[in-house]
Image (cartoon, rainbow, N blue to C red):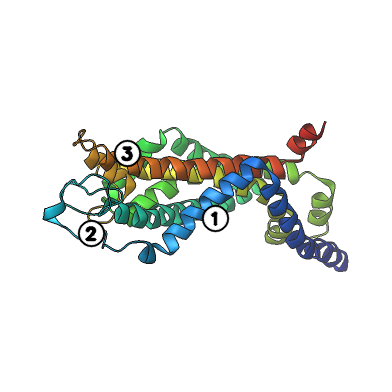
Amino acid sequence: MDTVSSLSNHKESDDHASSSQAWIIFKDLLKHPLGATGFTILLFVVMTAIFSPYLVSVDPVAVDFNAIQQPPGSDYILGTDEIGRSMWSRIVYGSRVALKIILFSIGGALIIGTTIGLISGYAGGRVDMVIMRIMDGLLAFPPLVLALGIIAILGPDLINATIAIMVVNIPSFARLVRGAVLTVREQDYVLAIRALGASPFRIMRYHLLPNVVGNIIVFASLRASTALITEASLSFLGLGVQPPTPSWGYMIAIGMNYWDYWWMSFFPGLAIFITILGFNLFGDALRDVIDPHLRDSTRK
């Protein structure tokens, strides 16, 4: 048992090195052209969401019937909507809604999916078969169709839309982690620790999870853009965020009814495009930096 402790302590001592390794990865990421661009875009979106009360002078739900569908100008920089609400205020506050849904849906899917994948990959046998058949069943549905089904059961609102998007993403995280665990669990040091009596929880926590966390982070950054698209689609259909809460997808849906007032759909669509671009650039660069095979290939 002392041997088990020494092996585990040796692995735990890597936690100090992991923080410096994370800093090295971050610096490499900023040196990457796509990474720097993606990080800058995401930083801009996050700062906009955090400081939104200081960036607008008009309440995003305030109605002004004397300024209905005003074009972009000095009074309203991005114009107004069909009932005179400031498009700038609604887009700025819409960033809060978008990031909140991404954070909680992808964060929840990451935690639950990673846990399921670790258990399935480590346990193997019937446990693995049952869990993966359930995940395959969920993956058989197109993501938007599955999200619509969940919304139909729970009802349309912000929280239920977040839950629906989270459930849609859980199987993908579970499969990713399970595949990585199946490879790592057969390595010699894991077999040795298992033979010496280490508990399954300790093996998964200290020896399997650290080896798959890089892939999880990269995958999460890429799935964030998908989550935003799903939320926008649900809100566009009237099944996501409900008015008067500002939602980019719902703003596009309303703008589609007023083709002559192009700014009502153009600016929310531009906000979605910029945010998705930021996540995709950041995720691609993070994958290039973390994946040693890609890094080696770029050096040759």
Q: Amino acid at mark 3?
A: Phe
The residue at which mark 2 appears reads as: 61
First in sequence: mark 3 vs mark 2: 2
In the rendering, at what x and y percent does residue 186 appear?
A: 78, 43
In the rendering, at what x and y percent does residue 273 appear?
A: 43, 40
Q: Is residue 232 left or right of residue 166?
A: left
Identify the secondary structure beneath mark 3. helix
Would you identify the image quadrant in which residue 253 lies?
top left
Can residue 57 be seen in this snapshot? yes
Quote the CA–CA distance across marks 2 and 1.
Answer: 35 Å
Q: Is residue 86 above or below residue 121?
A: below
Q: Amino acid at mark 2?
A: Val
Q: Is residue 11 left or right of residue 35?
A: right
The residue at which mark 1 appears reads as: 111
In the rendering, at what x and y percent does residue 274 appear?
A: 46, 43
Q: 112 or 129, which lies in front?
A: 112
Identify the secondary structure beneath mark 2. loop
Q: 214 or 99, which lies in front?
A: 99
> Quarter holding the C terminus?
top right
